[in-house]
Amino acid sequence: MDVRDTYRHNVLTSGHRACSGCGEAMAARMVTDIIGPDAVYINATGCLQVFTTHNQQSAWQAPWIHSVFANAAAVASGVEAAMRANGKDTPVVVQAGDGGTFDIGLQCLSGMIERGHDVLFVCYDNEAYMNTGVQRSSSTPHAVRTTTSPPGRLSEGKHHLKKDVISIIAAHQMPYAATATVAYFPDLKAKVEKAMSLKGPRFLQVLSPCPLGWNHDAAQTIQVSRLAVETGLFPLVELEHGAVTGVMRLARQRPVEDYIKLQGRFKHLFGSKGGAVEIRHLQALADARIRRYGLLEADTEWTTDTANQVQRRGRGGYARVSKGESQ
Amino acid sequence: MEGSHAVAEAVSLCRPQVVAAYPITPQTHIIEHLAEMVADGGLASEFISAESEFAAASIVLGAVAAGSRAFTASASQGLLLMTEVLFNIAGLRLPVVMVCANRAVGAPINIFSDHQDSMALRDAGWIQLYAGSNQEAADTIIQAYRIAETCELPVMVCMDGFFLTHTFEPVDLPGQDTVDAFLPAFHFARTLDPTRPITLGGGSEPDNYMEYRQHQHQALVSAATEIENVNLEFAQTFGRDHGGLIDAYRLEGAEVVMVTLGSVMGAVKDVVDSLRGQGQLVGALRLRCFRPFPASALVTSLCDTGCNAKRIVVLEKALSVGADGIVVTELRAALHNAGMAVIVEGFVGGLGGRDLTIEVIESVFRTASDGVSTRCRFAGLKPESGDQSTMGES
């Protein structure tokens, strides 16, 4: 007997071991429920793998495999090739953190895209190595405190900039690459659905705040995620075959200070002369991203104010009605 | 036919649905020939040019987990780059078959053959079979899929780079129908299938990790029986018997036995014949299977069935730097555990492609026992290396 909820797939079901307020758990639940259980999921090593599978327990109600940290995209390439060889069109989806995408997994991801595998790669970007205790990654933004980029007498946190991974991915001239975040669920849903409607390599970068690593109130994950967009620090964009085809317009630009003051990872920047300089740097980075994508003037259907006001369908708002059931 | 060509043809006869690889000398001819067969439509397979050996191993991992028969090949640096994934394939109990075209490991970088690459992977949980000829390499591929899929264990078919991969020998390739009858279509019980969702590769903790390993170890140990059985069935079907776990040569009445692996066995057999012709009671034994380590088969061959070894010399193309030869250490342990007080002397030779000539092999046979059997010696060092003995004693 199929005991699955008709209106919500619960591909990632409850009872897993994520921290309270975990942005990645929210994001993964949203993404996998939109895609549904008729897919094969490949997970890189990281928080999501650790908190969903543990000692012969699993929170996954879909076929799921984890191999090692760096190879999720290559394992997915093999799964997809096997599906093709067997005449099946089962969707293949990778889930990885920013470590498994920006850093150790980048080579396999590039290879997978270059070879044109029909795979959706979803990066849950929480901007550091959270599973091992908050070490900096190449996704960690400038001036952030992590355990391996600690502020000190000679340092104001991470020296380097957040890697612009979406541009690197889009430069492969692949069908679809987009950014999203948990604060704008209808936008995320639209992007997952668009990605799933296309063939070939597709990529989604979902900003997923980490209350532990970002040191913000666990009840504020959504607010923090929204402010990342409203300040311009994390533009929501879509790229098709390398060209920008969609952005989410900012109804208004919020100063970066509104975003960073909620998070302990930026706390060291307040109350010092050097910190004030870094805050100006962060503001300049946000301004540059807004200019680059035209976030204040783009002619778009949704803005950061209206994006969450779209008509919802169904309980919980995001499960497709299961096959065979008519409306 | 070139060894690489023969192996590629044998792989094709096994109908792999996914082939993934990255070029590396001396393995490259194998995947080049497979790519040609796919391009010409002779082999219906997804041929995937990976961006690294690490990815190639990961691709075949995914392909087998998704229910396809798969193949990859590598050597040396490439095999070492695969290392993390190869352990993972074994831990997941995925029946992957690969070829290692044995090559030295850098630094210093060297493309020529020895066994340091696959020997470094001896603890990865793979079955390791070492071929002595191109015919055997091709036949072992067909056997390897049977063994892997029956035992749910990965199999590495090791063949000497250049000595086999680039050497032309007559090879008899079986017909497709015979291979199809010997090797049924692949059905993987734990495949990734939405109609029966399973979780593969989840976390484990101290309270059950050891049991996973113990089961894996038991499966590998038990695979020895399957390797023997498949060899017998193969011999009945195809008329060629390469020895299951070991390939023994003129052990009857032998007092001195050389133990070795791989293609050097051909020259060793010539030396045995020549020394026997001079009245010396010598024999030879080739380890066809190194993992699982065939301890009881070795003890039986060396100490029963008419063989009366008083002195065993191991000639191997790998060493555990700072310790000793690898095979010699394991052989000593096996004989010790069986209560056999035989002198076992280890010689490391042929590293980085150095020829193991008839002269070197003869001198290894003739080097008198010094009574100190634990000393690692090098066979075939240059005279200027500062060694005092003909063997280049270290």
Image: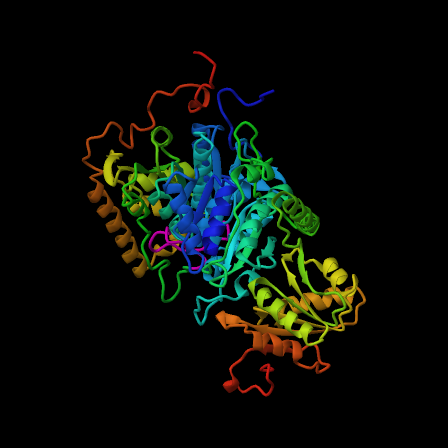
A160 drawn magenta: no
Residue A95 percent across, percent down from the top left: 45, 40
Residue A146 placement (x, y as % from top left): 43, 55
Left or right, residue A163 beside residue B143: left
Q: Residue at x 70, y 83 (%)?
A: B370
Q: Quick check: B208 above or below A152?
A: above
Is residue A146 found inside the magenta-colored segment of the image?
yes
Relative to A282, is A196 on the left or the right?
right
Which residue is nearer to you in this view: A169 or B40? Answer: B40
Q: Residue furthest right?
A: B339
Q: Is residue B29 above or below residue B202?
A: below
Would residue A168 be found to the left or right of residue A135 on screen? left
Furthest toward the front, the residue is B277
> Which of these two is toward me, A251 or A101?
A101
Coordinates of residue B379 in the picture (x, y in percent): 58, 77
When the figure is inspected, residue B84 is found, relative to residue A304, above or below; the finding is below
Give, as a single range, the part of the protein colored magenta.
Answer: A131-148
> What residue is at 40 percent from the left and 55 percent from the top?
B23
Magenta stretch, main secondary structure, is: loop
For the point 63% across and 58% down, which residue is it?
B288
Taking the spot 38% from the left edge, 66% from the top edge, the residue there is A153
